[in-house]
Amino acid sequence: MKKEYAENLLKKTKEDYNKIAPEFSATRYQTWKETEFLFNDYVMPGDKVLDLGCGNGRFFEFLEDKDIDYIGVDFSEKLIEIAKKKYPKIKFQVADALNLPFPNNYFDKIYSIAVLHHIPSEKFRRQFLEEARRILKPNGFFILTVWETESKKNLNLFIKDTALRLTGKLEKGDTFRPWGNKDAERYFHYFSEKELTKLVKQTKFKIIKQGVTTNERGNKKNIYLIVQK
C-alpha cells in the first residue's frame, strides 16, 4: 500500500470514529467478558498501565479495583470526551498511536484491544508495534487483540473491495465495514494468526502466549497475543 493512501486511511478512520462516537459508544458500553483474563492474569499492584486505543474507556472496568497508575489514549477526540465523562477522575487523553507522547521504558503493561486491525499498511502496523515497544519497560508485557477473520460474514465486503485491491490501493485482508446509516466506512485489516505472529516477531517482541477468545454466543472471535519486551 502506498504511504499517501495509508495516511489518508488513517485520517479517514479518525474522522469516521469522531462522526459515529455517540452511537458507537452506546453499543460498546459493556466489556468483553471473554477477555477479562487478559487483565486479571497480568496486571500487578503498582503497575503503570496504558490502554492504547481506549475508545470510551470501557475496559477500565476490569482495572478500576486494582492499585495501578492507569492512562487511556485514543486518536478520537469525541471518544475521549465520552471516556472523561464516564470516568472523570481517570486520566484520558488524545494521542496518536504512531507517535505516542511518553518517554522510553515508561509502562509496565500496555493493552490494545481491537485496535491494530485499523492500522493500514504493514509499514504503519510495524510502526504501531515499535512505538508500543519503545515506551514499554524491559520485560514489560504488551497485550493485544485483533478480530479474527469471519470468512462467511465478510465475503461480500471482500468482493466489494476487489476493485480497490486490483488497483493496488488495498492489500490482501483489507476491507471496509459500513456503520449503520452513517456516512462512515471503517477500514479494517483482517489478520491470520500466522501473519500477526510474524509481524510481532519482526518487531523483536517475544511471544509468551497466543490464542483466540470467543464470546458466549460464539459469534465474535478475537486473536490475542501476550508478548514481552
Image (spheres, rainbow, N blue to C red):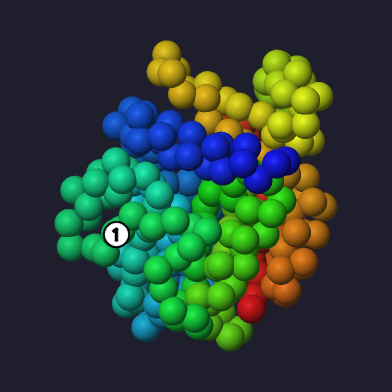
Percent x, y of residue 126: 67, 59
Image quadrant assignment for residue 23: top left
Q: Secondary structure at mark 1?
A: strand
Percent x, y of residue 122: 71, 51
Task: Report the residue at 31% width, 45% height from top.
Answer: 77
Image quadrant assignment for residue 130: bottom right
> Is 165 on the left or on the right of 88, as rendered?
right
> Is 91 on the left or on the right of 17, as rendered?
left
The answer to which of 187 and 169 lies nearer the viewer is: 169
User: In this picture, is 20 found above or below 11?
Assistant: above
User: In this picture, is 166 found above or below 64?
Assistant: above
Question: Is residue 214 visible to us here?
Answer: no
The answer to which of 103 and 215 lies nearer the viewer is: 103
Q: Residue furthest front?
A: 4
Task: Report the residue at 66% width, 70% height from top.
Answer: 227
> Is 118 on the left or on the right of 81, as rendered?
right
Q: Which residue is mark 1?
A: 92
Percent x, y of residue 180: 44, 18
Q: Quadrant of the C terminus?
A: bottom right
Percent x, y of residue 84: 22, 52
Task: Report the residue at 71% width, 31% height from top.
Answer: 169
User: In this picture, is 126 found above or below 9?
Assistant: below
Amino acid type of disc 1?
Answer: Phe
The answer to which of 90 and 204 lies nearer the viewer is: 204
Q: Quadrant of the N terminus?
A: top right
Q: Few, some or many C-alpha atoms within 10 Å of disc 1 (few <14, some 14-19, many ≥20)?
A: many
Image quadrant assignment for residue 132: bottom right
Task: Report the residue at 75% width, 18% height from top.
Answer: 163
